[in-house]
Each structure stands twice: as C-alpha cells, then as structure tokens.
Amino acid sequence: MTLPGGGHDPEALRRLAQAHPLASRAPFASRSYCGPLGLVAWSDRPVGVDLERVGPVEGGFGASICTPAERRRFADRLDDPGFVTSLWSSKEALAKALGDAVQYDPRRLESPLGWPGGRTGPWRAQVLTPAPEHVAWLVWSLAAPTGPAPIGPARSHPAGAGRR
C-alpha cells in the first residue's frame, strides 16, 4: 500500500491502513509503516507484519537483539545492514503475531530466520521484498485461537520465544 501520489506523510498512511474495510473487521490485524509504504495483514488467526527500510545500523545493534544461540549462528552476518534489518523485522512481526510487540524482548525471541522452511509448530513465516531497499516479514499461526490472548510471559510461544 502506498499513498496516492507517492507522498511520505506517515499519519496519512496510518489513516489509510487503519481505514481498510477488511482489516478493520478482522479478528486479527497487523500494520506496519515505512513511508511511503504501508503493509497490512488480517486473518481469523494471529498474524503479524513488519516493514523496514534497509540502511546503516549502529555497531553492535545486531548482536544486541539476538538470543545467545542467534549470536553464535549469525555471528558472521551481524554487521550486514540488510541481514540485521531483516532479523529485526522478523522479530517484530513475530512479536506482533504473539499479541503485543512491546511485551517481547527481542533478545529472548527466536527469529523466524532460524525456523527450518519458515515453520515451527503451528507458526509460519515469510520474508517479503516490498520495494527496493526495504524488507518485510509476515508471521502467522495455523492454529485457531482458543480465546483471548493472554498478556505477558504465560502465553504460548513458538520455538522458545519470550522465555524469561
């Protein structure tokens, strides 16, 4: 989704995405904005999206968002801005799918980048390339929700996500 005329007004983009008739009625919806682009997903099951522009990253940022296992697995790629941006975006999309991105510490959330075939249990993930110099992730659950999502660490987590 882009703004008509390709504008870069973040508030106009948010309003446009929030007003989408299907997303506003879906039990689960996720939105992400990185002007002039917006990404919206909706489903009858948990879903999360994140959209980021690839650019320079501060030294050490990649390692600071990794679990200990990810620091070992991805050590040779944690200075690559494209990889680090994708790693961050994958964790943001997963955290949104789990219910509330603010509730999850990325250092304790295993990235979908490490899921074999983009799958773990009932969870699926897909990297997207929405535009040049951008990366996006879509994460969704195949499991039907059994009730309102609990808040905090008692929630069921894919691949050890959110362990404290």
Image (spheres, helix red, strand yellow):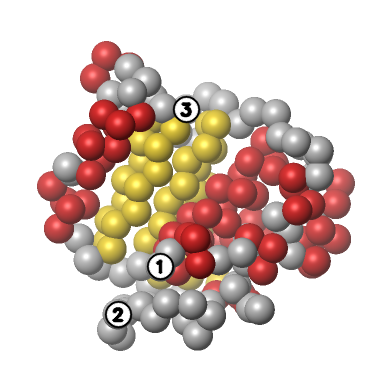
Element type at marker 2? Answer: loop
Element type at marker 1? Answer: loop
| Amino acid at dot 1 | Gly
The quadrant of the image that shows the C terminus is bottom right
Quick check: 52 left or right of 109? left
Which residue in the structure is indicated by mark 1? 99
* Disc on the earlier residue, 2 or 3: 3
Q: Residue 148 carries which label?
A: 2
Quick check: 158 left or right of 70? left
Q: Position of residue 7 (x, y in %)?
A: 33, 17
Q: Which quadrant holds residue 85?
A: top right
Quick check: 47 left or right of 25? right
- Which residue occupies 40% across, 37% down? 33
Q: Which quadrant holds residue 135?
A: top right
Can residue 88 be seen here? The reply is yes
Does the CB distance between marks 2 and 1 fall below 8 Å? no
**In this figure, what is the number of numbered marks?**
3
Q: Where is residue 38 in the image (x, y as percent from the top left)?
A: 36, 36
* Disc on the earlier residue, 3 or 1: 1
Q: How far apart are marks 2 and 1 (CA)?
A: 10 Å
Element type at marker 3? Answer: loop
- Which residue occupies 22% across, 35% down? 16
- Which residue occupies 29% across, 37% down? 14
Q: Is residue 91 above or below residue 162?
A: above
Q: Residue 131 carries which label?
A: 3
